[in-house]
Image (cartoon, rainbow, N blue to C red):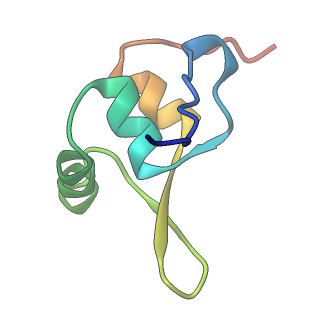
Amino acid sequence: MSTTKTKKLSIENLPDLLTVGEVADLLRVSKLTIKRWGKRGKLPAIRINARGDRRYRKEAVLWLLGIQQDKN
């Protein structure tokens, strides 16, 4: 039996930077697809730390979903 908690993200409460897994869950595609999109420039990634982990800007993910954010 697994005790890991799955945290469901909703569009209303997205953090400013999202992980590969979070973006994949939101867009309902695989993690590999997200990484490929980054390499092709469709969804640019920000590399963090020495390992080069990927993070994605909330605005870029929302743009892919066709959602414009208010700049108020």
Depicted 9 relative to depicted 45: above or below: above
> Which residue corresponds to the image point at 40% horizontal and 45% vertical from the top-left?
21
> In the rendering, at what x and y percent does residue 7 appear?
58, 29
> Which residue corresponds to the image point at 67% horizontal and 39% vertical from the top-left?
16
Q: Quadrant of the C terminus?
A: top right
**Left or right of 71, for residue 1:** left
Front in this rendered view, residue 63 or 51 = 51
**Left or right of 49, for residue 2:** left
Q: Quadrant of residue 3?
A: top right
> Which residue corresponds to the image point at 63% horizontal and 27% vertical from the top-left?
14
Front in this rendered view, residue 6 or 10 = 6
> In the rendering, at what x and y percent does residue 25 appear?
36, 30
The residue most toward the right is 72
The residue most toward the bottom is 50
Q: How many marks?
A: 0
> Which residue corresponds to the image point at 68% horizontal and 19% vertical from the top-left?
13
Q: Quadrant of the N terminus?
A: top left
> In the rendering, at what x and y percent does residue 42 appear?
25, 45
Front in this rendered view, residue 1 or 7 = 1
Depicted 66 relative to depicted 45: above or below: above
Q: Quadrant of residue 15?
A: top right
**Left or right of 45, for residue 72:** right
Depicted 21 relative to depicted 58: above or below: below
**Left or right of 15, for residue 43:** left
